[in-house]
Amino acid sequence: MFKEDIESLVSHLENLISTKTIVGEPIVNGNTTVIPIVTASVGFGMGSGEGQDEKNQGGKGTGGGAGMKLSPAALLIIQGDNVQVYSLSSKGSLAKLAEMIPEVIGKLKPQGKVE
């Protein structure tokens, strides 16, 4: 049973982690494409045991758990032939992302005549 529990847990983790989890759906506006990149951290553990109490009654138990954390790592911005990567993984990345929003929005504006 322990082996089956591990196989089941790993199978569920494999379903959670895919290229779609790490590389987000592209956001396209005109000739500009923004692709979010995410890092994934996964951990899991399992255990089992058996024993007897002072009345010589036996018992068995198993347990397991898993966790996953997704964090924004970068933005890949493609505009025509120009490709730029904006890293978000350094300290203060949320503040950095907030500072970048006007620049990213500016890149998403269609390139054409301004009326």
Image (cartoon, rainbow, N blue to C red):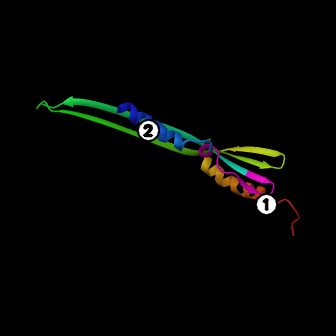
Asked where in the image residue 59 lies, by quadrant, the reply is top left
- Residue under label 1: 109
Cα–Cα gap, marks 2 and 1: 45 Å
- Residue under label 2: 9
- The amino acid type found where label 1 is placed reads Lys
Residue that lies at the very extreme toward the left in this rendered image: 55
Q: What secondary structure is found at the residue carrying circle 2?
A: helix
Residue that lies at the very extreme toward the bottom in this rendered image: 115
Task: Report x, y in % for residue 40.
Answer: 56, 41
Left or right: 94 as drawn, with respect to 50: right
Query: Which residue occupies 87% across, 62% down?
Result: 112
The residue stretch that appears in magenta: 20-33
Asked where in the image residue 37 lies, by quadrant, the reply is top right
Task: Report x, y in % for residue 95.
Answer: 62, 51
The quadrant of the rendering that contains the N terminus is: top left
Contact flag, marks 2 and 1 (Cβ < 8 Å): no
Task: Report x, y in % for residue 110.
Answer: 81, 60
Task: Report x, y in % for residue 47.
Answer: 34, 32
Q: Nearer the viewer, residue 30 or 109?
A: 30
- 30 magenta-colored: yes
| Foreground: disc 2 or disc 1 | 2
Query: Which residue occupies 72% across, 51% down?
Result: 34
Q: Nearer the viewer, residue 102 or 16?
A: 16
Lower sequence index among marks 2 and 1 = 2
Q: Residues within 10 Å of mark 1 (few under 14, many from 20)?
A: few
